Image (cartoon, rainbow, N blue to C red):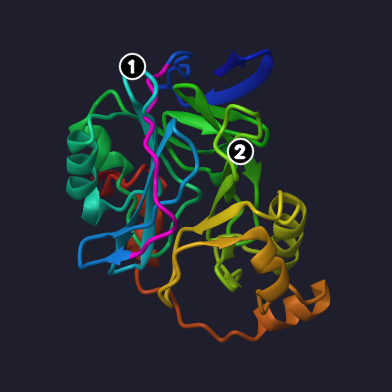
Amino acid sequence: MVQMLRLQFVRVSLLASKSSTTLPLNLTPISTQLPRTTRLRSQMASYSTSSHSSKLLFRQLFEKESSTYTYLLADVSHPIKPAVLIDPVDRTVDRDLSLIHELGLKLIYAMNTHVHADHVTGTGLIKSKVPDVKSVISKASGATADLYVEPGDKVSFGDLFLEVRATPGHTLGCVTYVTGDASDQPQPRMAFTGDALLIRGCGRTDFQGGSSEQLYKSVHSQIFTLPKDTFIYPAHDYKGFTVSTVEEEMKYNPRLTKNEETFKNIMANLNLSYPKMIDVAVPANLVCGIQSKAI
């Protein structure tokens, strides 16, 4: 069933699974001011906060086994302080939900940038603990979720929203979530790039329908065309970085600053090992991280 949502005279289509519902029009926002990028890394989490908007509460959380970043955003200016969680990990669901409770937020969406191969998503577990939460993933991913997004869709939480941009190449269904460009949205903008664009790197392209040609085009057309001061927040980092910008990656990314043919040659000769979690993670993540349903 295709369900339509109209937000501020902008057409938004969200194709839902059989059990899906439409996106609420008035969700509650969360807002807090965040100091300049700061890194606080422990065994449990990494928080990176930046001064973006009096409406926006933002936390960057870290899962050490898969080096995965999970992102919490909320509109704190809204009465119910609605929140979204991007790329949650099953191992850290209790931590994330505890933080959300402490901050007085209402989690409405648990979102994935793609079907991950290196960890099991926390969306299914979150839904079992907070039944009102809706899982979100791209329609192109082929995965199960309550709500499917497509390029150009806007996912609203309170008075804030995330724009959906298709960035396939690491997998067929990769998307990047970008904060809004309107005057009442946080500035500079923030791009949650999943595995498409990493800090000084990018995701591999040798499985799950990956394509180095497609990834190159995705990054250059959908991410590098954003304002240069847009913050880049990837799904992973293995070197201790927390955030970059479009301008930095356009200048210093050792792969994506090359021409397309050189990039494709680099990606074809990475000689990476087989992902150790892929045979567990991908089947589970295709069914929202509910391992008992994985084939």
Q: Visible in this render: residue 108?
A: yes
Point 38% across, 61% down: residue: 38
Which quadrant holds residue 1? Answer: top right
The foreground one among 225 and 154 is 225
Percent x, y for residue 60? 37, 53
Residue type pointed to by label 2: Val
Spatial separation of the CA atoms under disc 2 and disc 1: 25 Å
Which residue matches tag 1? 79
Decide: is 219 above or below 268: above
In the rendered structure, the answer to whether residue 129 lies left or right of residue 193 reads left
Q: Considering depth in this image, is 274 or 234 the residue closer to the camera?
A: 234
Judge left or right: residue 90 versus residue 139. left
Percent position of residue 261, x then y? 82, 77
Query: Which label was assigned to residue 165?
Result: none
User: Crowding at label 2, few (<14), some or many (≥20) Cα neighbours within 10 Å?
Assistant: many
- Percent across and percent down for residue 12 are 63, 22
The residue type indicated by label 1 comes to Pro
